[in-house]
Amino acid sequence: MRRTPRTVGAGRHVRTKDDHLTELYGLPAFTFPEERDSAGVTLPEADAVAWRIGYERGTGDERWKDTFERLCAAVDSARIRALIIGIWGDPEDTEPDEVVSAFLDARDRLTGLRSVYFGDITDKECRISRIGQTDVTPLIASCPALEEFSVRAGESYDREGLHPLSFPRLRHDALRRLVVESAGLRGHVLRGVGESELPALEHLELWLGARDDGGDGEIADLAGILSGDRLPRLRSLALRNSEMQDEVAAAVGAAPVVAGLDVLDLSLGTLTDAGAEALLGGQPLTHLRKLDLHHNYLSEPMRQRVRNALEPAGVEVDLDPSDAETEVDGDGVPVPSISVGPLTY
């Protein structure tokens, strides 16, 4: 059955990514044509669309960097507002170093760039856990006016010379939105984000994933994020798609960062009654505008407890369990599963 299109962080039913982004930064996506297909194509104004570089896997003849260079020559690159980085070669066998190099070479011409999505790759093109990735912080740091950065994290373990996603700490004074989608984030990525100085960040979204896909992060690795010390403007925090969602919920229940939030998202993971109990037993959450717990394994009495505790205060609570499926382990025992993980990808 075909699922509805979605974009990064869109929220509902994200077990698969069947479609490319349709918009970014409020702008409709437009795929810049390959040279062989460019004759007679009227290009939109540079700041009217989110430019996508990348084609369906196996159909393109042109290297990503060559297409990108033609884009920068064909339009006023200083007016480009949003860039969608699609597939580069074979993402299972090739790190996007060429993409990063081409981007950095063009950074002085991309003065108007405000939003980047790195890795607009569908499941048909490549499973998320098989996408080779790299250190993405040079892209962020090279654009001091960048407001949004999202990445489909991809490779979470060393394989055949490929390296996992890396995010060493950085400082960026303009970034307002940071999203990392993954089937398994490593602890050093979580620590790097938590140690970064991001004074303008308003929305942080991390898909923690599963150990079977390299997600070796521990609760301690979230300390820098949960303290909120370096995130004075954070209003929306999403720690999603985690197989340790109960532990995350317990940690969030005592986390200083929560007091300043409008939206808390612990969806897509393996949340059970134990996690919800710990969350309700922590600090008050009645100041939130929304609590998103969809894709959960709560009992109906616990769902009602959450509603009773928060909805009278005006908190919008999403407790929809409809897309949470139970998997069977090697011993035949049913176990909760994350939305995007080793058994789904």
Image: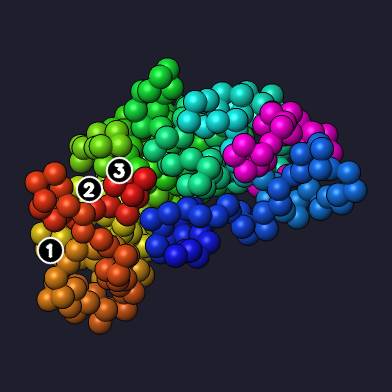
Percent of width and height locating residue 112: 71, 43
On the image, numbered disc 3 is attached to which residue? 342
In the displayed structure image, the side of residue 270 where residue 165 appears, left or right = right
Q: Which mark is residue 273?
A: 1
Residue furthest to the bottom: 312
In the displayed structure image, the side of residue 328 where residue 153 appears, left or right = right
Identity of the residue drawn at 17% across and 52% down? 328
Determine the image quadrant of residue 16.
Answer: bottom left
Whether residue 327 is visible: yes
Of badges 3 and 2, the one in the foreground is 3
Residue 341 drawn above or below residue 61: below
What's under tag 1, amino acid-wise?
Asp
Query: How many numbered marks, from 0 up?
Result: 3
Whether residue 260 is visible: no
Question: Spatial distance from mark 3 to mark 2, Cα to Cα?
Answer: 11 Å
Residue furthest to the top: 161
Determine the image quadrant of residue 54.
Answer: top right
Between 48 and 18, the one nearer to me in the picture: 18
| Residue 107: in magenta span | no
Q: Quadrant of the C terminus?
A: top left
On the image, numbered disc 2 is attached to which residue? 243
Residue 98 drawn above or below residue 271: above
Q: Residues within 10 Å of mark 1 (few under 14, many from 20)?
A: some
Q: Quadrant of the N terminus?
A: bottom left
What's under tag 2, amino acid-wise?
Glu
Of badges 3 and 1, the one in the foreground is 3
* Span colored in magenta: 53-82
